[in-house]
Image: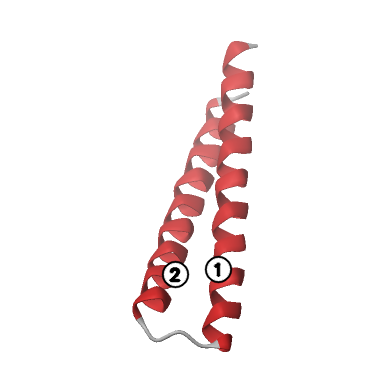
Amino acid sequence: MTAMERQDLQDLLVRIDERVKAIQSAIREINDSRRCAAHHEKLRLLERLAWGGLAGVAALGGRVVFEALK
């Protein structure tokens, strides 16, 4: 893995982390507001996005570690 690829992966990880934090903030905002069916659906979607982002970060982190150990 070249230095450029590592930098690109690092930038991607940072962007994913920022998006996950924004999603977590949106979830917190929804939790603080009153509960209703529409909010429940939004909350479920945002939670799935957050977990998907976390899985993506973990996969990219694993790839970086794997490439570093090669």
Q: Quadrant of the C terminus?
A: top right
The residue at which mark 2 appears reads as 27
Determine which of the numbered discs, if any, sits on residue 46 in the image: 1
Image position, residue 7 (x, y; %): 50, 36
Mark 2 or mark 1, earlier in chain: 2
Q: Dot 2, crowdedness within 10 Å: few (<14), some or many (≥20)? A: some
Occupied quadrant, residue 33: bottom left
**54 relative to 59, above or below:** below
**64 relative to 37, above or below:** above
Determine which of the numbered discs, if any, sits on residue 26 in the image: none
Name the residue rendered at 40%, 74% in the picture: 31
Please indicate whether residue 11 sits to the left or right of residue 5 in the image: left
Q: Quadrant of the N terminus?
A: top right
Q: Dot 1, crowdedness within 10 Å: few (<14), some or many (≥20)? A: many
Nearer to us in this view, 52 or 33 = 33
Q: Amino acid at mark 2?
A: Ile
Please report contact status of discs 2 and 1: CB closer than 8 Å, yes or no: yes
The kind of secondary structure element at disc 2 is: helix
Q: Amino acid at mark 1?
A: Leu
